[in-house]
Image (cartoon, rainbow, N blue to C red):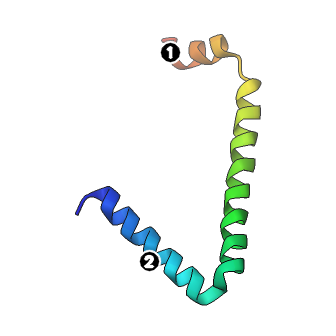
């Protein structure tokens, strides 16, 4: 079984369990919560990247001591 196929199978199983245990409304709420946290994390990371000095960062990483 390919990795993609195994992931799809796992996702389908997880969705069936969520729907069975939580119902459609609570499942939707749960999925949007995790998605919102990810968006916030990505925004924080992008904000952090904006403050980086590319030349200084590369100098620190690639300059030989």
Position of 19 relative to 55 (above/below): below
Image quadrant where one finds the N terminus:
bottom left
The x and y percentages for residue 36 are: 73, 56
41 sits to left or right of 60: right
Residue denoted by label 1: 62
Instruction: Give the mark nearest the N terminus, 1 or 2.
Output: 2
Query: Is residue 51 depicted above or below 59 in this figure?
Result: below
Q: Nearer the viewer, mark 1 or mark 2?
A: 2
Mark 2 lies on residue: 13
Residue found 64% across the figure and 10% down from its top:
55
Q: Would you say 27 lies left or right of 16 here?
A: right
- Which SS class for mark 1? helix
- Residue shown at the point (71%, 79%) measured from the top left: 26
Residue found 65% across the figure and 85% down from its top? 23
Please tell me in which quadrant of the rendered image residue 22 appears: bottom right
- Please state which of residues 62 and 9 is positioned toward the viewer in this rendering: 9
* Residue 6 on image: x %, y %: 33, 65
The residue lying at 54 percent from left, 20 percent from top is: 61
What x and y, as percent, mark residue 39? Answer: 71, 49
Q: Is residue 64 left or right of residue 37?
A: left
């Amino acid at each position: 079984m390919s990795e993609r196929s195994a992931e799809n199978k796992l996702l389908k199983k997880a969705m069936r369990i969520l729907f069975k245990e939580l119902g459609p409304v609570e499942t939707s709420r749960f999925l949007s919560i995790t998605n919102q946290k990810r968006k916030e994390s990505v925004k924080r990371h992008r904000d952090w990247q904006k403050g980086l000095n590319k030349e200084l960062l590369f100098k620190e990483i690639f300059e030989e001591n």
